[in-house]
Amino acid sequence: MAKISHIRNFSVIAHIDHGKSTLSDRLIQFCGGLSDREMQEQVLDSMDLERERGITIKAQSVTLNYTAKDGETYQLNFIDTPGHVDFTYEVSRSLAACEGALLVVDAGQGVEAQTVANCYTALEMNLEVLPVLNKIDLPQAEPERVAEEIEDIIGIEAIGAVQCSAKTGFGIEDVLETIVKGIPCPEGDVNAPTQALIIDSWFDPYQGVVSLVRVKHGTIQAKDKIKIMSSGAVYEVDKVGIFTPKAKNTGILSTGEVGFVIAGIKEIKGAPVGDTLTLSKNPATEVLPGFKRIKPQVYAGVYPVSSDDYEDFRDALEKLSLNDSSLFYEPESSSALGFGFRIGFLGMLHMEIIQERLEREYDLDLITTAPTVVYEVLTKAGELVMVDNPSDLPPVGNIDEIREPIVEAHILVPQEYLGNVITLCIEKRGVQMNMTYHGRQVAVVYELPMAEVVMDFFDRLKSTSRGYASLDYAFKRFQLSDMSRVDILINGERVDALAIISHKDFAQGRGRELAEKLKELIPRQMFDIAIQAAIGSHVIARTTVKQLRKNVLAKCYGGDISRKKKLLQKQKDGKKRMKQVGNVEVPQEAFLAILKVGK
Ligand SMILES: Nc1nc2c(ncn2[C@@H]2O[C@H](COP(=O)(O)OP(=O)(O)OP(=O)(O)O)[C@@H](O)[C@H]2O)c(=O)[nH]1
């Protein structure tokens, strides 16, 4: 238990790839939390997938003891935050537990969109933000220029900011001194009724639910009866402690501290993120301000390739949602794909990660339909319905208005690529709201339809700017828009899972491209396959997959047997991800073809 004046709770925020994880590991290493061997692996990114992709998904924490130059030992509770645009909401979750944040900026790259977005989130939450110029070992590092850029674009003091190289270890002690001197200690009353904020909860197969908490007032000790304030449920604390980064029982967490609580809670819903913990004896009367829950922005239907896997799929989703409170799912059925689930995601990266985890960790073969944003539909009867699935769109005759979600996108781009970025934004139906010049960089603000942004905008932005433009966006409002559903018919049969909602100006083009794309993707079969795109009963495009003329094996007649086997195996593998639509075999790629359209 540390003296409250000697506690510092902080996060590290940064644009992706500016070196947050590397710096975090250095700080842990400097404070003796890790051996050299453990240092080889980045510790805070614990999931395999994260390591492979080099991004941080789950907020985690570590408690460090640092003996400062003033001779005093400080307890530094450091809470990790993710850096990718899909996960910005997790940042505010971590920041709610802190008094300060290190704003890590790559001294070669300069300020990028999420540097700005994350910094504002921290400032709004009244945190002390301390800039850190990282990667000064790089020959292209320009710490002075970047410091000016921080002052100019973000408006916080940065001249004289601490400089370091997380890679070489240079300046790490200065960073720690900056934390001790620059970040205020927590405030709180150790004798007041206990109040602790649940920053994160996850399911551990051996311990049950583990919650990461920040104690604002009072203490939590082993054997205490804790009460979850939203539900009133009472549990007995088994273990409390800190992460060093390994979990270490301390028997108590006191005011100002950050650590874990395990209390025999079986369900993640039992300890909701953002909720307040108190003690059943002398409970607090008020809950702590939580943080706003984020709703999924992108929905897609996910179906097992084999209907036998449905139960396993449901179990897998249940398990996965134990560790990912942002995962939303509900059963859905499609006439083309059978029984599956509609899953809500925070963005396209989240969708990819979930799909990969389901396939990899749970060994499922899945088919995912094209992702859709949520539309607000006003019916002629005056009802407002939210539609997250094209096939749920009411019949055209019943629709009064369709309103699509609009985001405000903040883009930072070097001047030489500004033209390309503007061209892209216009192509994506963007409306420019603001543009300011900051030295070599330009900050542009656009309102863009979310549907356009979630598709391929990020990749396009990167490629059109050689990787230099950066993006941050947030939902702003719904806006009346001229949208319609484009249906795909295969041999006259409407395939619900292939329907898309598109702006009328693009509907014709997208319908045509989609039909063409499907023609490439659907293998030739023993008969002609007609592919049509239609709006209502009006066919807007048509293509045909011609029938196979010869048996593929005929070519091998008399040829060697191993080649024949290979061919058969290839056909078999290819079949794994096929879905039967009427009498036509449609491959998985076909259901995602829409993502490749409109580029
Ligand atoms: N030269 C140099 N490279 C660095 C330094 N710090 C980090 N890097 C490299 O920059 C890349 C990104 O670093 P990470 O620590 O993964 O960045 P991050 O901000 O944590 O990224 P996410 O975890 O993906 O959000 C890695 O290849 C690091 O090795 C530094 O001080 N100097």
Image (cartoon, rainbow, N blue to C red):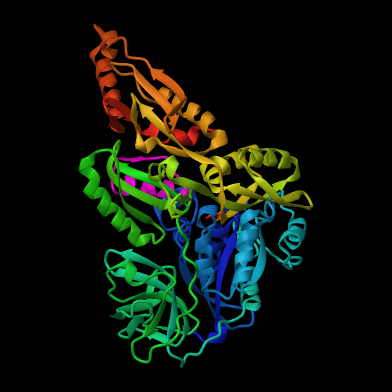
Q: Which residues are magenta?
A: 349-376
Image point 37% across, 92% down: which residue?
282
Residue 151 location in percent, x, y? Answer: 75, 63
**Residue 19 % position (x, y):** 58, 56
> Does the magenta run of residues contain 367?
yes
- Tell whether 571 sits left or right of 2: left
* Residue 415 in view in this figure: yes
Observer-nearest of 267 and 391: 391
**Residue 466 appears in the figure:** no
Position of residue 556 measured from the top left corner of the image (x, y, whole percent): 27, 10
Image: 77 above or below 590: below
The percent coordinates of residue 86 (x first, y second) are 51, 53
Q: Residue furthest left?
A: 308
Q: Quadrant of the N terminus?
A: bottom left
Relative placement, left or right, of 126 versus 336 is right
Which quadrant: the C terminus? Answer: top right
From the viewer's perspective, is 547 left or right of 507?
A: left
Is residue 511 within the magenta segment?
A: no
Q: Nearer the viewer, residue 47 or 199?
A: 199
Q: Residue at image x 43%, y 33%?
A: 536
